[in-house]
Image (tube, rainbow, N blue to C red):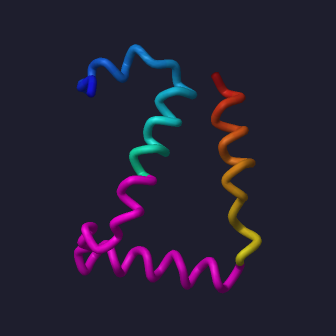
Amino acid sequence: MKHITATDTLELSVPERIQLVEDIWDTISNEPEAVKLSHEEKKIIDERLEAYHRNPTLGAPWKDVYKRIVSKQ
């Protein structure tokens, strides 16, 4: 297995780096019990979730956000 450093990732294109972050996040999300939230982090998440429930149309689907990010390159 090849080991890469943070510096190595800077040689990747922006879409490749985004994909890398998504891949890493997928491995983390498979183990949610390993991620411990502080009281403050939980409070922020709860507030954002409540705001979403009050007005779910304020956000944008991920695919739309991703297209905006990629189109700015």
Magenta span: 26-55
Q: Position of residue 24 (x, y in %)?
A: 39, 45
Q: Position of residue 34 (x, y in %)?
A: 25, 68
Which residue occupies 51% across, 35% down? 18
Q: Position of residue 45 (x, y in %)?
A: 43, 75
Left or right of 35 in this view: 56: right
Magenta stretch, main secondary structure, is helix
Left or right of 53 in this view: 28: left
| Residue 11 to residue 16: above or below | above
Tell me, yes or no, whether the highlighted magenta stretch contains residue 34: yes
| Residue 14 to residue 59: above or below | above
Tell me, yes or no, whether the highlighted magenta stretch contains residue 31: yes
Residue 66 falls in image quadrant:
top right
Residue 4 visible to an observer of this rendering: no
Q: Residue furthest front?
A: 1
Which residue occupies 47% across, 80% down? 47
Q: Quadrant location of the C terminus? A: top right
Q: Quadrant location of the N terminus? A: top left
| Residue 2 to residue 34: above or below | above
Q: Position of residue 39 (x, y in %)?
A: 25, 80
Which residue occupies 28% across, 76% down? 40
